Amino acid sequence: MDKKSIIGIAVVALLFFGFAYFNTQEQKKYQEEMAAWQAYQDSVALATRPVVPAADSVALTAGGQDPEQAAEAARERRVAALGEYLAAARDGEEREFVVENDVMAVTFSTRGGQIRDVLLKDYTKYAPRGERNIPVSLMDPATARFDLSFFVKNGLNNVKVNTMEYVFTPSAVETTADGARAVRMRLPISETAALEYEYLIYDTKTPARDYLVDFDVRLVNMAAEMANQTSIGIDWSNTSYQNERGFKNENMYTTVAYRFPGESSIEELSMSDEERSKEITTSVNWVAFKQHYFSSVFIAPQNLSYADVGFTTAQPGSGYIKDFSARMTVPYTAQTTGYDFAFYFGPNEYSILKKVGDTDAGDGDLYLERLIPLGWGIFGWINRWCVIPVFDFLRNYIPSFGIIILILAVLVRLVISPLTYKSYVSMAKMRLIKPQVDELAKKYPKQEDAMKRQQATMELYKKAGINPMGGCIPMLIQMPILIAMFRFFPASIELRGQSFLWAGDLSSYDSVLNLPFSIPFYGDHVSLFALLMALSTFGYSYYSYQQTASSQPQMAGMKFMMLYLMPLMLLFWFNDYSSGLCYYYLLSNLLTIGQTLIIRRMVDDTKIQAIMQANAARKSNGKKSKFQQRYEELLRQQEAQQRAKRK
């Protein structure tokens, strides 16, 4: 046997014995954990055992076991499984209490030391009959869960601690030196070791600070008690109520969101799915249960090392919108003494979220404002840097949001008026040169002369100074603004509860007629602003078609889509949308029609004709550009290829 064979056999043997030893240790650890878990289950069963009535105690005694002895035996088994202090906390009596500031009321529970409910004082939700008279609650208290899980030593065994199974010992609520209300709760692990929670609720009259709850977790003398582990688990879940008028629209904006450290963007689960979950194996900075206009955010400035997030959509009419869940972990070492967390419970308002930051933990910009779906890329830039600053400025001085939307629509039309002017002039040139284009069609009537006809037409356009796309390009440039507005209005909590004319709430649809039946894709109500917006779209499309159909024959094939199908689709699409959005598009259409009529009166076709003739005279003696030369050469080559094919 050669040297290489001997080395190979030795390596294989080493791997085999190493694996056998590792497997033996894992099996031993598993058996110890299972034994501890079984002992714990036995203690739970005994602790929850029904109390035997006094009349039956004789029979029990006759069976050879005294009730007091049985209770004592059960207690001893619990102590053996959990330790003296955890066993006592396991059977403690739960208590709830409320701590308030100017903007919210937070309900705490000593079971699990968790926040059970958050009531937002400045906001109300829709009642079943449609009125707003119920304060917004961010979660159903019966479903609220915040559970820390870790292993502690108990003799030779390791005990898994789930904080939701234990009752914490609360201290009296105190006011700290910086004015915060401090809520402290303690879960004893041993005589000197404990898990401590401290919540700080501020009342600074600054929403960005007052909606933020600092949450500090302290491991007091826990290093000696903690078993060998590399992470601590966090299980956070709750069910959110339906707070808005329409289930479909609110559900579309309700999801789970999270942010990777160092990123200025956020990630979201698909909003409209009935059930969705995702496992995140990289670090995340925060996880949010995002509703349409409100959010509950768990912030971990030191980063979560793992997260498995998801939701399940509730049934329409149940009063709920989604069941949220997030299973997360934070790193742990023997040197870890605690964690600095925070919660944000509040509205999805840009001016507030932009300023939220857990400054004590020092994370810097949290980018919570990205929870508001303002659009990606250029659409988000337009909203963040143009629309929102103007909107916030106007609402500081104008109380009516209907007037603010009107001013915003006028400003937008003024900004894009140069584009509208260029578009009209381009269409006017196409209309005036139409007779000459028809002459070229008569000159080259045959199909094989199509290249010559196209070349002559392009030459005619060039001499007249016409860009065939001149009427379309300005419209395309306007599209980002229209789409930005489409994202801005439904996401603006500022419109929530604001009335204008017949619309009682500009953030919801304005139902002027409730139908006794539901029309597919339309709904069971009639939104007047959506109807007027569709009619104005039809009017604008009809006017535009009349202006372009004569100069652009290809538009005739789009008549049905432009005049009838598009307004009808918008009517069905926007019937459930924000009435503020429909109102804005209505104003935009009316202002565009008025602007076009004014430009038409200002622009003289005779002057345009003179300009076109001057361009033609100037360019007739001019040298052809390289682009034009290449284009004409390409046309000649294509024409030659077609002749070759015909031969």
Image: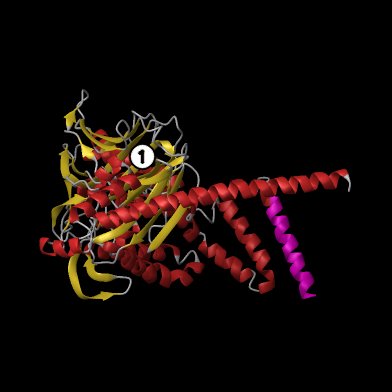
Label 1 sits on what residue type? Ile
The spot of residue 597 in percent (x, y) is 33, 55
Q: Is the magenta stretch mostly helix, strand or loop?
A: helix
Residue 209 visible in the picture? yes
The spot of residue 509 in percent (x, y) is 24, 60
Residue 280 visible in the picture? no
Provide the residue designation for mark 1: 299
Position of 84 relative to 632 (above/below): above
Quadrant housing residue 211? top left
Residue at left 55%, top 50%?
A: 465
Left or right position of 505 against 411: left
The spot of residue 493 in percent (x, y) is 26, 48
- Residue at the far left in the pictured view: 55
Left or right position of 306 against 644: left
Residue at left 22%, top 40%?
A: 395
The type of colouring in the image is secondary structure
Pick the residue in front: 95 or 435: 95
Magenta-span inclusion, residue 644: yes
Pick the residue in front: 580 or 14: 14
SS at badge 1: strand
- Residue at the far top in the pictured view: 177
- Residue at the far right in the pictured view: 2
Question: Which quadrant does the C terminus fall into?
Answer: bottom right
Position of 226 relative to 562 (above/below): above
- Residue at the far bottom in the pictured view: 517
Magenta-span inclusion, residue 590: no
The spot of residue 291 in percent (x, y) is 30, 52
Magenta stretch in the rendered image: 629-647
Residue at left 44%, top 50%?
A: 33
Position of 643 relative to 73 (above/below): below
Circle 1 packing at 10 Å, graded few (<14), some (14-19), many (20+), is many
Q: Tell me how many marks there are.
A: 1
